[in-house]
């Protein structure tokens, strides 16, 4: 299998380190807008980097991406850029006749008059619109195939197939106890994306009502995370699972709650109240006259780059899917989860926990596709495919998952 | 008296409206970096503007300012710019041989190793260094002559002269109940200056110890403000009064506490934790490549301009000086204060309460200087001069002050 990996940031770099240990890959072209980032990722693989090459590529230039896919004779495009580049990469892949994987879906835009009640353009709508073309091409666009969305969706399908007869609610729950030495505040994931997820109207699915939205930070609950992480305050945020799971799994309600913690929630609220979350440009003094900048970019520039903080970070991150329903006539509640200890991922891969956890899942998926275990055509979520082979292979990558029966 | 008013922002514009009603002024040249702002301020005076003219002037260009002072045959420079321009204007005035007034003093810089214990460069140090030159020139540099510092210092001197035999503590206390329709968060004063005041290490004076600093937001207390404003949470902030009052008034302790309220304090803390209060440039994407901007300028650009919010504002602002000590052998405690109702200042002058309250005091001081009631040479604070004539004249401007005996 020949792969075009677009994006050599934190997650893309971790993908190269995981992929370098797997034989199923014939070649990976690592492409980034900043060639030096791609080259650094490949150089870091040392003697294990012989199947990798680096090149410069502008992810927003659809035609350039299509040409590289053809030139490099790629079977699949793996998108590890930020969600602004989903659509050009997705279309380039369709045009080139390759498979496509991403870890975040095309962006939403709020309902113009009732943003906190009704959906406007939903996450992934832009991609599902082209579903017919993907089906006709015979190629697979496997969307939302990171950890969340991704593994969390696989868990949902696994619960439906093997653990429940009937499902009342599926709630993805994400929490961590990561701290960064020397920083009072240092988000462990891209602040741009975190703001996008948290300040957009959160989406909820109910069978009778369909998809709808609420106000940001709604329905706070304290969820007790496993393996020593403990209780963390979680709130509704906009996330792909809520849009994906109901398309293939029967459940009365689907939610996503992010364990941001009180302090982070308070900070995000302040950014919003002051308009600093905005991507709309403001005019400020520059060195040679007024310049236009996006406040959210300035917030990101003031914070340390989370991909570079692994050495100073300690703690664990947990992604998982809580499911409530009925099995054999009795009520049942489980939490299926995946925990990564930063000390382990740094020692083993030199990647911090959150980016490593995101990166391992698309590599597992590629291996299942390369081996013909996962097949299909059209735009599919991870829950559209058989979960057991995925979960078994993930364990073989040294990243075991867990199941906790809730009392 | 001929005046060069530098700065036609909110306070400068309010100065023109107040000054236009007083006969003692022969001519005021209104100067601003942005000529249109100066012209707008003069044009708004209508038939009362015949003694005013507008011109363009860069407040950072010391030699240009000196030339204008000479050309316009000014007796005094009134500085209504932000504190970054204090030193060039102060030096230009000294060079031109005119008197000088400002409402904020030269900036501080924190102690390099013990910022929250010891003073580094204090507010006004840059100005007091030139005190000898001012004395020799026979001209008066009256510094910190707004409302706070300014009227608050006059109150301190008045208390020492007429209300107390011995003073234990002088604590300037500032609070408001202003709200702005249509905004969750809209500071009523320049956010750039507010951040500067609140996030610099607060300075405290004690007779035995001299000046020292504490951590930001230290010693929170709830102070009950008069005329219906009520209780507001106040914390120590860096302010000129603490540096000025002990030079001329005998007191065991001097503090300044700002009634920011819980919510504003929380927001400022978040700005600080995220590094968004910083004036050091960060690099962010611009329309044609990376640009360097100051995060604090971006915060200011995201918020509405406080000088333009008067129409939507309601409530009152209070500036005042709380004094505790002994009179005739008995313990005494008083709060000397000045309240402005936004509805009154908008109706009477078209200026919002906070900027009007700042602007009225230097005009009163100019009238006392023009009439020979206030005289002196060197760098003096308002508490160096007789308080009673000032307080009496302030009342004649339609802005009475009050005294509350504390039980």
Image (cartoon, coloured by chain):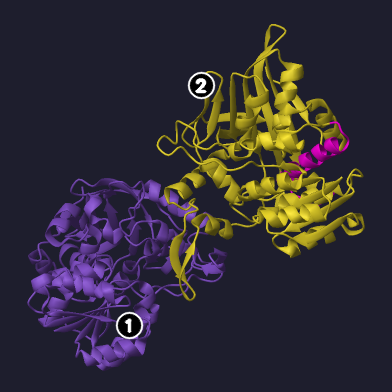
Chain colours: A yellow, B purple
Is residue A260 a member of the stretch shown in magenta? no
Residue A375, how many percent across, how many down? Answer: 81, 32
**Alpha-carbon span between mark 2 and mark 1:** 66 Å
Residue A268, how many percent across, how many down? Answer: 51, 46
- Name the residue carrying label 1: B89
Residue A209: assigned label: 2
Residue B362 in view? no
In this view, the mark in front (2 or 1): 2
Residue A314, how many percent across, how many down? Answer: 72, 47
Q: Main secondary structure of the magenta part?
A: helix
- Residue furthest top in the image: A329
Secondary structure of the residue carrying tag 2 is loop
Secondary structure of the residue carrying tag 1 is helix
Looking at the rendering, the stretch of residues picked out in magenta corresponds to A348-373
Is residue A351 a member of the stretch shown in magenta? yes
Task: State which chain disc 1 sits on.
Answer: B
Q: Determine the residue positioned at 12% across, 73% down.
A: B20
In terms of image quadrants, where is residue A48? bottom right
Residue B179: assigned label: none
């Amino acid at each position: 299998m020949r792969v075009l990996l677009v994006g050599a940031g934190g997650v893309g770099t971790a993908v190269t380190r995981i992929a370098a240990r797997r034989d199923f890959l014939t070649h990976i072209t690592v492409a980034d807008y900043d060639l030096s980032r791609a080259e650094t990722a490949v150089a870091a693989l040392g003697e294990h980097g012989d199947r990798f090459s680096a090149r410069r590529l502008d992810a927003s230039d659809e035609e350039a991406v299509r040409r590289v896919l053809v030139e490099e004779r790629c079977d699949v495009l793996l998108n590890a850029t930020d969600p602004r580049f989903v659509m050009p990469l997705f279309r380039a892949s369709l045009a080139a006749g390759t498979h496509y994987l991403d870890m975040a879906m095309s962006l939403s835009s709020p309902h113009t008059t009732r943003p906190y009640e009704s959906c406007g353009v939903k996450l992934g709508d832009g991609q599902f619109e082209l579903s017919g073309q993907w089906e006709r091409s015979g190629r697979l666009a496997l969307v939302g195939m990171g950890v969340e969305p991704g593994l969390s969706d696989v868990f949902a399908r696994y619960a439906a197939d093997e653990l429940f007869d009937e499902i009342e609610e599926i709630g993805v729950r994400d929490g961590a106890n990561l701290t960064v030495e020397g920083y009072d505040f240092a988000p462990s994931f891209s602040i741009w994306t975190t703001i996008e997820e948290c300040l957009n109207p959160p989406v909820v699915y109910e069978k009778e009502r369909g998809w709808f939205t609420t106000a940001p930070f709604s329905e706070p609950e304290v969820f007790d995370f496993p393996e020593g992480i403990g209780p963390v305050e979680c709130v509704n945020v906009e996330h792909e699972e809520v849009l994906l799971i109901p398309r293939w799994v029967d459940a009365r309600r689907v939610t996503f709650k992010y364990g941001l913690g009180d302090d982070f929630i308070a900070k995000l609220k302040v950014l919003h109240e002051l308009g600093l979350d905005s991507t709309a440009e403001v005019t400020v003094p520059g060195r040679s006259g007024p310049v236009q900048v996006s406040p959210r970019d300035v917030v990101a520039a003031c914070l340390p780059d989370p991909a570079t903080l692994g050495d100073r970070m300690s703690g664990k991150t947990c992604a998982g899917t809580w499911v409530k329903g009925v099995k054999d006539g009795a009520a049942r509640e489980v939490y299926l989860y995946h925990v990564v200890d930063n000390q382990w991922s740094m020692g083993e891969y030199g990647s911090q926990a959150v980016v490593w956890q995101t990166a391992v899942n698309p590599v597992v998926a590629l291996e299942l596709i390369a081996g013909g275990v996962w097949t299909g055509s059209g735009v599919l979520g991870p829950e559209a495919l058989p979960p057991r082979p995925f979960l078994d292979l993930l364990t073989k990558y040294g990243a075991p998952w867990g199941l906790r029966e809730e009392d």
